[in-house]
Amino acid sequence: AWSTDWTAMKKTVHLYNEIHPFIYTMKGGLSNNGELISSWSSTSRKERVQELRALNPKVKIIPTIFRWENPKEKIQENIGMGGRSDIRDHHIQVIVNEIMTYGYDGIDIDYEGMSCDKKEKFEEFFALLAKEVHKKGKLISVAVHPKTPAEKSKKKELQCRGLSKPIHLDFRENWRGPTTHDYEVLAKHADRVKIMAYELHPRKYHNPGPGPQAPNVWLKDIISYAKKRVPTHKLYMAIPTYGYDWALNCKASAKAIYHSDAQRIKSGTHKNRQPTDINRILNEENKVASWRNLSKFSDIHKNRAYEDPSLWYTSGGCDRVAFYMNRRAFEEKMTLLRKYDLGGFSFWQLVTDNDPEINVYLSKLVQGQLPPVEKAKEEEEPKEETTIQNLDPKEALKVSNSQSKSKSKTKQF
């Protein structure tokens, strides 16, 4: 699990093979100098690693370095852009020094939202970093954007300026982050490829509006794409422990929702649905005409009933819907994942305010107390059809707000 919550780490470390303390980011904003910033002091890094190992001697501690590329923070020189291989090499050495100084078992690279022109430089950087990390007998993990198979008639090649060859768009998610994360290339060097299978419905109102973060129907598509590109023992599926709460008929901001938020909403007037069939709800409710933040996206929910629970209520004069995560939905997702041969499972994120029953479920899982599941059959992807699409990297930077991840706000330093 990734985690920013030290209390939660200590309390549940016995349930995990690996912990990713979410503590590093890059120094600098629009330019990089190779240095890192940590939210834990030097003393804390040493003491907390020792404490986690004392609580679970078998746990691997693999901290995360995170940067989401946005107008104020770039991923440039640290991966060798602009001919700055000197800064890239320094960045690599800084990372290796952190691993060795604090006795980590490895490092997790979480560089997100990069424009397509960075694809090859990121791959070069990652290969060089992996080589140095492996020399020290340590592990390297990479967090990647989720991708799903493209339809046969829509497979294309993306000509991105600055690259030596076009990007093969055999996936649907044609925006700057996924175009830069090549599963097959990164898997050649990584020990773990961790797919961030969440944020299908980001908190912004732009397409696709309110909905669950990782419904099973989507997880299946992600696995279908990844299984053909990442070796089984390296492939990890990461699912969410949170949800979002949206206004349906006003401009109030959407917000993250955890266990205590759901309990608070349940204490008032509300309707709780699980599974959630949005189209059925739209047909039954008499306020649909005013639910403009949801009704305009009704088509994408047709013929789908999500295992995720939802709360429909009114607050501050607004009708709202909150998709949240409870044990039942979490267990249904995990049951699906367990049907596939995977290297493991990951979660964003491990916090004190998760549904406590999730930990009960995980305890049974790690103790082998859950019944076995029937293995899923592998599905074939459609045959390829190729056309050419040109995209300037400056245009690729204009990512829709609908793709802005929760990490940009919830991962604070």
Image (cartoon, rainbow, N blue to C red):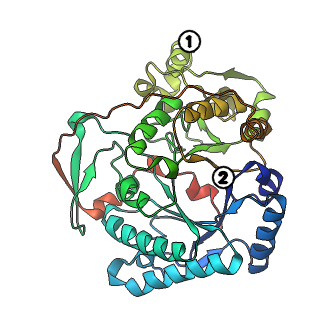
Q: Nearer the viewer, mark 2 or mark 1?
A: 2
Amino acid carrying label 2: it is Ala
Specify the quadrant of the image occupied by residue 76: bottom left
Using the rendered image of the protein, determine whether residue 34 is visible from the camera's viewpoint.
Answer: no
Q: Which residue is mark 2?
A: 1
Rounded to the nearest angstrom, the CA distance separating label 2 from label 1 is: 39 Å
Q: Which residue is mark 1?
A: 284
Disc sitting over residue 354 in the figure: none
Q: Quick check: 91 left or right of 380?
A: right
Does dot 2 land on a helix, a strand or a loop?
A: loop
Residue 61 is situated, as x and y percent measured from the top left of the image, at 68, 64
Which is nearer the eye, 406 or 284?
Answer: 406
At horizontal 34% and vertical 39% (from top left) the residue drawn is 149
Amino acid carrying label 1: it is Glu
Residue 413 is situated, as x and y percent measured from the top left of the image, at 66, 68
* First along the sequence among labels 2 and 1: 2
314 is higher (above) or lower (below) than 100: above
At horizontal 49% and vertical 40% (from top left) the residue drawn is 200
324 is higher (above) or lower (below) than 163: above
110 is higher (above) or lower (below) than 376: below
402 is higher (above) or lower (below) than 74: above
Does dot 1 land on a helix, a strand or a loop?
A: helix
